Image (tube, grey):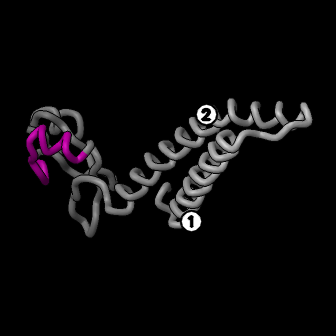
Amino acid sequence: MVYLATKDGAVIHHTSPDAMLEMDGIAKPEMEISEAEFEAAGGVFRIVDGRIVLGKTEAEIAAEKGLVRLNEIDAELDDIDRKSGRPARAVASAIAKGGTASKQDLARLDEFEKQAGDLRKERSAILAAGAAG
């Protein structure tokens, strides 16, 4: 069990009522939860209207999801940059030699640019929504 109480405007927790009494001078916890509930709440507790509330708010959860997606988008953009290097070099080489780039290389670059553009729009929308914190 995990025992929760408020002290000096903060939520404190102990795994035994004796420790709560000895360390914080609190004889009776305000809430008792299982260790599984404690873990499920991510160790996040707050005081709302004088009561202990477990877990994260919807806004905090959304912000975390937004941050995860931003990191995924950044990784995808990095991957696109790596993949586009070969066709970009081929196009530059062809032009430098006075020739024309292959349709295949140009199509690959166009596809990479479309993917990157879509990802940048998604990234901007996440940031505009404030979902990343």
Quarter of the image holding residue 82?
Answer: top right
Q: Residue at x 50, y 43 (%)?
A: 71
Provide residue 12's location: percent of width, then percent of height: 25, 44
On screen, residue 103 above or below 127: above
Helix or strand or loop: what does disc 2 sit on? helix
Kindly tell me whether residue 91 is visible in this rendering: yes
Q: Amino acid at mark 2?
A: Lys
Pick the front one: 113 or 21:
113
The reply to whether the C-beta atoms of the residues labelled 1 and 2 are less than 8 Å apart is: no
Q: Position of residue 123 (x, y in %)?
A: 55, 56
Mark 2 — residue?
A: 83
Residue drawn at 13 percent across, 45 percent down: 37
Quarter-wise, where is residue 50 in the image?
bottom left
Quadrant where the N terminus is found in the figure: top left
Point out the tag, 1 or 2, that comes first from the N-terminus: 2
33 or 79, which lies in front? 79
Counting other residues with Cα less than 10 Å from the Cα at mark 1, is it few (<14), some (14-19), or many (20 or more)?
Answer: few
The structure residue drawn at horizontal position 40% and vertical position 51%, both measured from the top left corner, is 64
Q: Secondary structure at mark 1?
A: helix
Tell me the amino acid under the disc marked 1. Answer: Ala
* Residue interval drawn in magenta: 29-41
| Residue 99 rendering spot, x and y as whole percentages | 86, 37
Q: Is residue 79 shown in magenta?
A: no
- What residue lies at 64% left-to-right and 47% top-to-bottom? 107
- Pointer 1 residue: 128
Measured Cα–Cα span from mark 1 to mark 2? 28 Å
Q: Is residue 130 left or right of residue 7?
A: right
